[in-house]
Image (cartoon, helix red, strand yellow):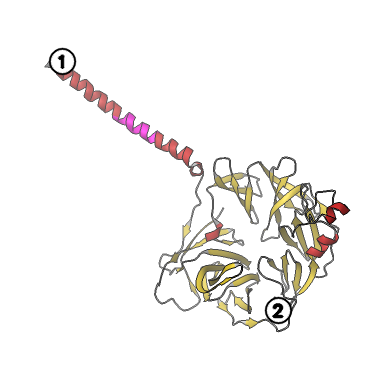
């Protein structure tokens, strides 16, 4: 009996020792599982700040577009609507219900809702203009009001397509540029009237720069063989009165850089770069930044466009991709593939320090460039009751790099 009791005691002692070992093993296995199966979890999360919980929420939405304004950003928040959708030869065309908000120093403010699709928008100072198929609407972000529809003038054939272009307001003026694959359009009166100052397809066609291998531009054989392609994707920025273009029209070559006076259409001599440009972004202070790849090895780089036209390499990430560039006055944020995870890369422009955070999805977030703040409005499904009188503040959360 004594021996049996001793064996039982030893087994109990072993069990007591084994229990913490088993718990520790399970903990380590769980931690390693997270480490290997979800590599992005090893990096810091974005730290979100919540607004007043008592504020109302907005209606559920599908996507957000952000437009820089003085002291904030205009947010156009859209949801696909079956009402007004129609089938065409090219497929089903949808309408969108748009909620118009302004992110300013006091918070996120609802300005109104429009039962119509907004093609594009731009802000100059505290005034913004919305471009729709039937005309324009003016938005006063200081007063929080959306104006009545201003119909397009009849017989005006100079108006550009506002789908797929980039609108830029010239600082301190009511003048606008619209930059697209069609070229450059200039408006002296905040979008009421337009004239084209650069025909980009004609310029490239005249120089035979559409889709040839480098060195074949002047080849009659290549010209006659129909190798020419459509206008390539363009990357743009505005430097004073100059509109800057970067594009990759020739296979196997670096990017083509073109500078044009947006008002007069005068084009400086285009020149070739030793990298291929894949994105451009502009900071609130006017700083211009590019994502590019080297020609020989395809290495990714972050570049700064300097006043003399030269490009300065700020960071090279090798074969780790860079995309979705966002430029602030003191930080650049890009999404990257760090080899085993998709991440947000943050480059401090003052110290050149690089840090990583978990990836950020811009589709459902607005961006306030003035404060380099990411804004996520809180939304609801269905009917949330009678809304307050416009304009009114709404609930959201925000984070910064």
- Would residue 138 be visible to someone looking at this image? yes
- The numbered mark, 2 or 1, whose residue comes first in the sequence reads 1
Q: Which mark is residue 221?
A: none
For residue 383, side relative to residue 63 (left or right):
left
Quadrant position of residue 354: top right
Q: Which residue is mark 2?
A: 192
Please, which residue is most extreme toward the left here? 1
For residue 335, side relative to residue 238 (left or right):
left
* Magenta segment: 19-28
Q: Is residue 24 magenta?
A: yes
Measure the alpha-carbon separation of dots 2 and 1: 101 Å
Dot 1: what SS? helix
Residue at point 30%, 27% (across, down): 18
Quadrant position of residue 298: top right
Against 96, is 271 above or below?
A: above
The foreground one among 167 and 172 is 167
Dot 2: what SS? loop
The foreground one among 223 and 247 is 223
Q: Which mark is residue 3?
A: 1
Q: Position of residue 174 (x, y in %)?
A: 71, 75
For label 2, count other residues whose C-alpha is less than 10 Å away and answer few (under 14), some (14-19) or many (20+). Answer: some
Against 147, is 263 above or below?
A: above
């Amino acid at each position: 009996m004594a021996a049996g009791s001793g064996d039982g005691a030893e087994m109990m002692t072993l069990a007591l020792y084994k229990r913490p070992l088993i718990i520790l093993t399970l903990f380590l296995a769980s931690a390693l599982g997270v480490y290997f199966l979800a590599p992005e979890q090893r990096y810091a999360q974005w730290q979100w700040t919540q607004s007043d919980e008592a504020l109302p929420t907005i209606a559920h939405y599908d996507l957000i577009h952000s437009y820089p304004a003085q002291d904030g950003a205009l947010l156009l928040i859209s949801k696909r609507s079956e009402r007004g959708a129609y089938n065409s030869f090219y497929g089903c065309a949808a309408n969108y219900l748009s909620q118009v908000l302004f992110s300013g120093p006091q918070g996120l403010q609802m300005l109104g809702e429009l039962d119509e699709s907004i093609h594009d928008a731009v802000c100059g100072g505290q005034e913004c203009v919305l471009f729709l198929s039937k005309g324009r609407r003016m938005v006063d972000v200081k007063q929080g009001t959306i104006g009545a529809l201003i119909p397009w003038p009849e017989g005006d054939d100079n108006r550009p397509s506002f789908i797929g272009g980039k609108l830029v307001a010239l600082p301190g003026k009511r003048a606008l540029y619209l930059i697209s694959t069609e070229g450059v359009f200039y408006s002296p009166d905040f979008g009421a009237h337009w004239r084209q100052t650069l025909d980009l397809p004609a310029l490239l066609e005249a120089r035979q720069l559409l889709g040839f291998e480098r060195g074949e531009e002047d080849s009659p054989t290549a010209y006659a063989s129909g190798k020419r392609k459509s206008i390539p994707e363009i990357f743009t920025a505005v430097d004073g009165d100059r509109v800057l273009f970067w594009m990759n029209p020739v296979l196997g070559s670096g990017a083509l850089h073109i500078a044009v006076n947006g008002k007069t259409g005068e084009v400086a001599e285009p020149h070739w770069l030793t990298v291929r440009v894949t994105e451009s972004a502009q900071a609130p202070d006017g700083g211009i930044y590019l994502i590019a790849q080297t020609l020989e090895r395809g290495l990714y780089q972050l570049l700064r466009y300097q006043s003399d036209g030269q490009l300065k390499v700020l960071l090279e990430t090798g074969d780790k991709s860079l995309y979705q560039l966002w430029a602030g006055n003191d930080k650049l944020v890009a999404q990257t593939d760090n080899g085993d995870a998709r991440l947000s890369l943050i480059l401090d422009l003052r110290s050149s320090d690089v840090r990583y955070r978990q990836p950020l999805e811009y589709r459902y977030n607005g961006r306030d460039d003035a404060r380099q703040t990411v804004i996520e409005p809180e939304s609801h499904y269905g009917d949330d009751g009678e809304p307050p009188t416009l304009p009114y503040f709404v609930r959201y959360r925000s984070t910064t790099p």
